[in-house]
Image (tube, rainbow, N blue to C red):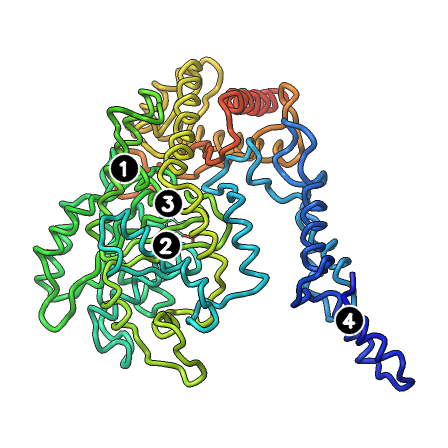
Amino acid sequence: MSNKMDEQITENDTSKQTVPAWAKFRSEMLHSFPSPFKTENDSLAEGIYLAIRELDKLKPEIVGGPAFLGTNSALTIDFENVKDSSLHPKMSSSNDVIQQVIKMFEGLPNWGHPLTMNNVNPQGNTAAIVAAILSEIFAPNILEGEYAWNVHQAELESAGILANLAGWKPKEAGCIYTYGGSGCWTYHLKYALTRVLPGSRNKGVRTDAKVICSQQAHYTMLNSTDWMGLGMDNIIRIETDMETNAMDTKHLEEVLKDCQVKKIPVASIVCTMGTTDASAFDPVEEVRKLMDKYPNPEGYGKALLYCDSVIGWSWIAFKNYDFKLNPLGFSDAVLPYLEKNYNDIKGIFYADAFGVDFHKTGFSPYVSSAFVYRDAEEFESLLSRGPSVYLQPRSPYNPLNYTLEVSRAATGSLAGWATLKFFGHEGFQSVLGGILENKVYLQNQMANNSEMVCVNSGDYGFVTLLRIYPKDVDAAFQFDRELKDVTFRDDLIKHNKMTQAIGDKLFEWYRSGKKINDQCTPYLSYSTGFRAAEYNRDMKDPEAVIYAIKIFPLNVHITSEVMDHVIACIVAARDELLSNLITP
Ligand SMILES: *Cc1c(COP(=O)(O)O)cnc(C)c1O
């Protein structure tokens, strides 16, 4: 394990009678730092090799094994006492610590397992994971050029590729890799406030400028408006269309008119491009037209148009796909979905900025989100703080002068960039289209079971939301009544509770390694209100909402056989629940 240099130090140290204890510990420690020089037996290379081999032992032996790592799926943290911990007086060994880390992975969801379909949690691709790991070894700091050197290519080239996909001029655009879709939301808000309230950088936010987004917008709007100091009360929620869940532009126009009459500035309008469950896309082009029609009052800057496209962004990879010739051979059932999603996402062209989560529909590890802006000169000069006294500009690219963060790991930028390079158009198209092929298969199979109903069959996204009813109930009819007819409110609530109980039963089965037809059961989740009943559009009645079992097959290992199994498991969970009710 040791290299020559370590041996020399050890020899020198032991040759002295009076070697201080610290030097002894320090020399022991040296073996557990990576060698800075070429060597055959670097502790890091060996350590990573062994750790991955050990970690992989937690994978299930066989196809059909459980969708979590290891054999014990229980939560084993002693939450009462875990914090009652202090720094150990003795040094430990690197190997020992690594073993303990591996133990922590016991029971963790296995995101790549074909039975994992709970949410937008894809398994990362190998190129992206390896790129991310490399960033931890030589640790480029992408805050500025001197510490990032050529690794800055990843962020800069990502900006160009993503801007190109949006139809923007790549050389004029830019991007910042940051902490998640919520980081992107926060970046947009800072950009908007700085543009619209020019004094705010020095004097603080002293005006109740409004942030407008739809009722379906992601709850991170609360984080951003709160932490940015604008205040959550300054969010205006626009109604969404009952059918498409997209922002209702008539309502938006009323709100903009009202703001104009009252001389209230709008900081930004956020179009959500692909909501988590309904996969709704807001009509960006129309929103842009309305923003041009109702500019901010004098004295305020131009409102920003942001696309929260962190889930929907990757459909843009269908740019230039020939949907008629269909060179990749997608099925007739799937093609219209692909085309619709591409036509919806291409509206990001009209935005000033958009968000990209590679850890969602980019099949990359956390945290690899990119905030992409159309006008780099504007964004970077608006937020510029001038140079630091610590750091010298050694390259033309020094984003620390305008970023929220100071130090930034290259992890996200390398993971995102690696994915873009690896996938190309074809890769994104095949993976995304493949997910929809599985989804369509699932929905066709469901149609054969009259006790089940797909409650989001109008959606074009990845998710299937379903309700299953007691035996011999005509699910389609029953659901239609529950959705539309207030006299079925009690039924709706009763079946919501049943849906929740089935969802919890399935979770318990997944965690306990229960088998149905010799295979473990899937890791699913459920929604406690993905939409309101039609008579409850204003959501005044918190109970008149639709619960549904959620199947999110965002995983390249899933096959149609797995989908058949999912249906069988849902039916079995319903049967067990109902038989327990009858014979307690
Ligand atoms: C996931 C999501 C967010 C939050 O992103 P994180 O990456 O979890 O921080 C914001 N908006 C939408 C539409 C999302 O789907």
Q: Amino acid at mark 3?
A: Ile
Residue tagged 3: 311
Left or right: 238 as drawn, with respect to 293: right
Dot 2, how many residues are within 10 Å of its Cα: few (below 14), some (14-19), or many (20+)?
many
In the drawing, what numbered circle is on residue 6? 4
Q: Amino acid at mark 2?
A: Ser
Question: Residue 40 location, x and y as percent?
Answer: 72, 57
Question: Residue 523 location, x and y as percent?
Answer: 55, 34
Of mark 4 and mark 2, the one earlier in the sequence is 4
Question: Residue 150 location, x and y as percent?
Answer: 44, 64
Closer to the eye: label 4 or 2: 4
Dot 4, how many residues are within 10 Å of its Cα: few (below 14), some (14-19), or many (20+)?
some
Which residue lies at the image location 62% right of the left edge and 22% below the top edge? 516
Q: Amino acid at mark 1?
A: Tyr
Question: Residue 191 location, x and y as percent?
Answer: 27, 66
Residue tagged 2: 158
Left or right: 43 as drawn, with respect to 10: left
Query: Real-space Cα distance between discs 2 and 1?
Result: 20 Å
In front here: 531 or 324?
Answer: 324
